[in-house]
Image (cartoon, helix red, strand yellow):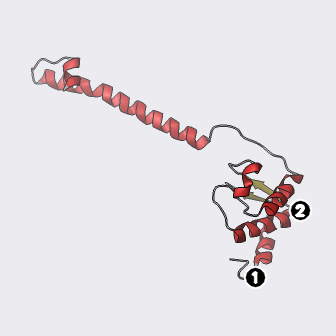
């Protein structure tokens, strides 16, 4: 939008007051030519002057999906890695791990509830003075 309003340079200059910009999940959403061009201008404007921290779930070899223009992809990566410290995290997603833990915890709670349910039925059956066993209560 800033490019359409002929204000991209001013908008990038506003971001220059920040020592660090964090671009999280850069490769998550596919961008069009205008968006990647603006992103490239931001990277270029900050190159060797200000810091950018980027998280992406794609290695640099997959960044052709981010920047549709191959030359722009190479130029952006070149600027980003020139003075960079790169952390490659080949670990399981913490979100996936948390979801698994929550599902396992929920499953444990449901298992505990299922284990307690026959006991309640047995107690009810005993209160009604009818014979009951654990196996017969589970079958019904």
Sort mark 1 into few (<14), some (14-19) or many (20+) by Cα contacts within 10 Å.
few
Give the x, y percent position of residue 52. 79, 57
The residue tagged 2 is: 49
Q: Is residue 114 left or right of residue 82?
A: left
Instruction: Say which of 12 and 117 sits in front.
Output: 12
**Which residue is most to the left?**
129
Q: Is residue 96 left or right of residue 31?
A: left
Rendered position, 75 above or below 120: below
User: CA gap, disc 2 to disc 1?
Assistant: 23 Å
Residue at 14% in and 23% down: 125
Image quadrant in which you'd find residue 32: bottom right
Rendered position, 34 above or below 77: below
Rendered position, 76 above or below 120: below
Give the x, y percent position of residue 73. 79, 59
Q: How many marks?
A: 2
Residue at 70% in and 38% down: 90
Instruction: Say which of 113 and 41 sits in front.
Output: 41
């Amino acid at each position: 939008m800033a490019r359409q309003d002929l204000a991209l340079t001013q908008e990038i200059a506003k971001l220059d007051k920040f020592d660090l910009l964090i671009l999280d999940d850069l490769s998550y959403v596919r961008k069009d030519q205008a968006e990647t061009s603006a992103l490239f201008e931001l990277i270029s404007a900050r190159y060797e002057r200000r810091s950018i921290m980027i998280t992406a779930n794609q290695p640099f070899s997959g960044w052709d999906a981010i920047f549709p223009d191959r030359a722009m992809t190479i130029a952006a990566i070149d600027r980003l890695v020139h003075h960079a410290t790169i952390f490659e995290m080949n670990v399981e997603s913490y979100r996936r791990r948390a979801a698994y833990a929550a599902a396992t915890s929920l499953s444990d709670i449901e298992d505990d509830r299922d284990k307690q349910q026959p006991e309640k039925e047995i107690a009810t059956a005993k209160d009604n003075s009818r014979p009951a066993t654990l196996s017969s209560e589970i079958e019904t």
